[in-house]
């Protein structure tokens, strides 16, 4: 197992050097900006589908907009670095829920064609994206959790462990 980890680290360093060789910082910023703009355009297109009451197209375009916007972060910090950040202990649960909600939104929209479940997972996807995004802002999760406790007093005081770092 140790030999495999060393091999993965060497491969990761090679990949990072390869990406840095291919793209300088300005090009990575442009790639990130392009993905963010494309993701925002997809959100706008999704709204048009929502107005037209085509909920399946709305869900699919919205979800792909999230995927493109998330992919933009790969340009900024590289795929392996982003993956490492997603796997940090305080971020792994929101990341898994966010990715799972995106997959389930697509499954219910395209494969099962269930509009009610598609909408449920779209709402969950939006909430998961919000909470996942909050994990990147110092103390934002703690603030969010405290606000949730005030809004929903039925939540036990020890329901959320504060582990911001």
Image: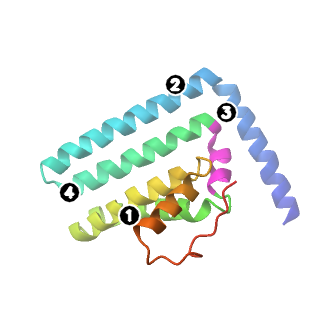
Q: Earlier in the sequence, mark 3 or mark 2?
A: 3
Q: Earlier in the sequence, mark 1 or mark 2?
A: 2
Along the horizontal axis of the image, is 82 left or right of 64?
right
Image point (45%, 59%), residue name: 128
Looking at this view, is 120 or 31 the one in front?
120
Along the horizontal axis of the image, is 148 left or right of 137?
left
Q: Earlier in the sequence, mark 1 or mark 3?
A: 3
Looking at the image, do the residues carrying marks 1 and 4 touch, with CB atoms under 8 Å apart?
Answer: no
Question: Cα distance, mark 3 to mark 2?
Answer: 14 Å
Give percent across and percent down for residue 121: 34, 65
Q: Quadrant of residue 151?
A: bottom left
Residue receiving disc 4: 55
Looking at the image, do the residues carrying marks 1 and 2 touch, with CB atoms under 8 Å apart?
Answer: no
Compared with 49, 4 (above or below) is below
Secondary element at tag 2 = helix
* Residue 99 is at least partly visible in this image: no
Question: Cα distance, mark 4 to mark 2?
Answer: 32 Å
Image point (45%, 66%), residue name: 150
Looking at this view, is 131 or 45 the one in front?
131
Secondary element at tag 1 = helix
Question: Cα distance, mark 4 to mark 3?
Answer: 38 Å
Question: Cα distance, mark 1 to mark 2?
Answer: 30 Å
Q: Nearer the viewer, mark 4 or mark 3?
A: 4
Q: Which residues are magenta?
A: 77-86
Along the horizontal axis of the image, is 10 left or right of 66?
right
Q: Earlier in the sequence, mark 4 or mark 3?
A: 3
Q: Quadrant of residue 14?
A: top right
Image point (57%, 65%), residue name: 93
Q: Earlier in the sequence, mark 1 or mark 4?
A: 4
Residue receiving disc 1: 124
Mark 1 Cα within 10 Å, few/some/many (few <14, many 20+)? some
């Amino acid at each position: 197992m140790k030999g495999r980890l060393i091999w993965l680290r060497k491969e990761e360093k090679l990949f990072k050097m390869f990406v840095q060789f291919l793209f300088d910082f300005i090009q990575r910023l442009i790639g990130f900006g392009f993905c963010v703009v494309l993701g925002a355009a997809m959100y706008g297109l999704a709204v048009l589908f929502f107005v037209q009451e085509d909920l399946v197209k709305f869900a699919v375009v919205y979800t792909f907009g999230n995927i493109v916007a998330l992919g933009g972060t790969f340009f900024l910090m590289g795929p392996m670095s982003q993956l490492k950040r997603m796997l940090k202990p305080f971020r792994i649960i929101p990341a898994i829920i966010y990715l799972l909600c995106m997959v389930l939104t697509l499954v219910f929209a395209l494969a099962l064609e269930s509009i009610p479940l598609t909408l449920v997972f779209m709402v969950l996807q939006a909430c998961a994206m919000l909470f996942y995004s909050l994990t990147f802002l110092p103390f934002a999760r703690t603030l969010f959790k405290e606000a949730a406790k005030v809004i929903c007093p039925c939540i036990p005081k020890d329901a959320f462990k504060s582990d911001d770092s």
